[in-house]
């Protein structure tokens, strides 16, 4: 693909294979995929907790058992119907939430499908579920985190917002998103026409409820409020170090006592926890000279813990490892909030 420079000479513009196929990425895809994965994980944990608290009741009778994998399939089908029936971005938050709940109900019963005796309590189930969620998260990162948005994708995002606006009007937040996409798109071909379309859309204050957006905004406000207490980010780092130390102790104790855990799981937990601890120590050494660099190392440490260490802990402790997962997610949120605050202060000083 070629375009003209200011002097009139042609220059080559590289077009990604996805764009050549007419597949621009949704600028808000990471949020929707995050909703899907969080809903999946939360559904699995809440389902397990509810069933344990109620004595694992069965829906059905007379030889019938309506497993919750069926409800999961119905909810995933409903999500597909919603997403395939309506144009524009309005229903994607709801579709990602409904689909995530459905997938959570589905994958929770994976133990029944990988064992010959349909064992719901199959010991590695927790690790399988966790690996599935992590794998989907890495796929989302590969699709959306490794390459900056192309200006034409930003233009497509603005037009996508306008799809809902031309029939229902623009809420203030939708207009802000569309205008931000147009700014990032610059002067690519079609930007002027898209700008005219966006400017022509009437105002409208009526919008679909967005509980996911409300919860995420509340969580961001809480995290930024917490880090105003200067000891909170440091407490998060100390908790991360303590978590790594606990994992090392857990692996060593399991090996020493011969508790029957597979050797590869013990070694994996030990190596991953040690790596997370080393990254955390590097952060402590760097944070005095460059706070942003130090907290980037802390972020790497907690990501290693989330992606690798927790998998082995779920294999060792099954669902008891959920507490460690919640701690890691809280630490990651606090570290991310501190990084955001540090970058804003640096930009202000600059």
Image (cartoon, rainbow, N blue to C red):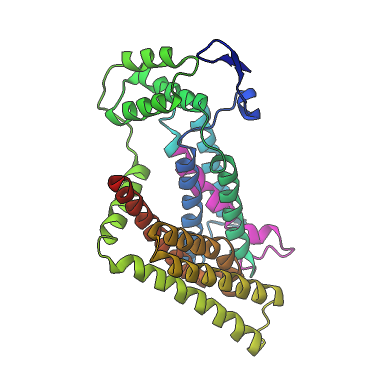
222 is higher (above) or lower (below) than 184: below
Which quarter of the rendering shows the N terminus? top right
Instruction: Tell me residue 165's x, y (percent).
Output: 36, 21
In the rendered image, the vertical position of residue 263 relative to residue 194, given as above or below = below
Q: Is residue 235 left or right of residue 244?
A: left
Identify which residue, 323 or 73, lies in the foreground: 323
Which residues are the magenta region? 94-122
Judge by depth and name the residue closer to the eye, 157 or 119: 157
Q: Nearer the viewer, residue 304 or 137?
A: 304
**View extreme (bottom): residue:** 257
Q: Residue at x 49, y 19 (%)?
A: 188
Position above or below: 284 against 221? below
Q: In the displayed image of the protein, which residue is found farthest to the front?
A: 7
Residue 159, visible in the rendered structure: yes
Position of residue 313 measured from the top left corner of the image (x, y, whole percent)? 57, 71
User: Could you say which quadrant of the image residue 166 lies in?
Assistant: top left
Q: Residue at x 36, y 12 (%)?
A: 196
Residue 54 in sight here:
no
**Main SS class of the magenta portion in the image:** helix
* The image quarter in which residue 28 lies: top left
């Amino acid at each position: 693909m070629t375009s003209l420079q200011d002097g009139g000479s042609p220059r080559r513009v590289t077009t990604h294979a996805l764009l050549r196929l007419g597949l621009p990425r949704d600028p808000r895809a990471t949020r929707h995929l995050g909703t899907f994965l969080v809903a999946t994980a939360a559904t699995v944990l809440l389902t397990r907790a509810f069933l344990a608290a109620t004595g694992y009741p069965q829906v059905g009778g007379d030889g019938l058992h309506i497993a919750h994998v069926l409800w999961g399939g119905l909810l995933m089908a409903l999500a597909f119907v919603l997403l395939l029936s309506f144009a524009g971005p309005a229903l994607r938050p709801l579709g990602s939430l409904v689909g995530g709940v459905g997938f959570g109900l589905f994958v929770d019963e994976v133990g029944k499908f990988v064992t010959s005796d349909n064992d719901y309590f199959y010991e590695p189930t927790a690790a399988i579920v966790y690996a599935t969620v992590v794998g989907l998260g890495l796929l989302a990162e590969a699709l959306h985190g490794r390459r900056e948005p192309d200006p034409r994708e930003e233009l497509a995002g603005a037009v996508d917002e306008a799809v809902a606006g031309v029939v229902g009007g623009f809420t203030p937040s939708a207009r802000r998103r569309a205008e931000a996409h147009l700014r990032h798109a610059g002067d690519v071909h079609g930007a002027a026409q898209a700008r005219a379309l966006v400017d022509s859309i009437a105002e409208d204050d009526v919008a679909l409820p967005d509980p996911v957006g409300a919860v995420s905004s509340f969580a961001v406000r809480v995290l930024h409020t917490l880090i105003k207490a200067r000891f909170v980010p440091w407490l998060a780092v100390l908790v991360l170090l303590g978590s790594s130390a606990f994992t090392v102790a857990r692996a060593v104790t399991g090996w020493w006592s011969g508790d029957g855990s597979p050797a590869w799981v013990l070694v994996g937990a030990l190596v991953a926890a040690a790596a997370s601890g080393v990254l955390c120590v590097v952060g402590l050494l760097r944070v005095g000279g460059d706070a942003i660099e130090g907290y980037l190392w802390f972020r790497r440490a907690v990501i290693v813990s989330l992606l690798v260490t927790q998998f082995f802990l779920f294999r060792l402790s099954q669902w008891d490892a959920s507490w460690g997962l919640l701690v890691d997610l809280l630490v990651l949120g606090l570290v991310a909030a501190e990084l955001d605050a540090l970058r804003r202060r640096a930009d202000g000083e600059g």
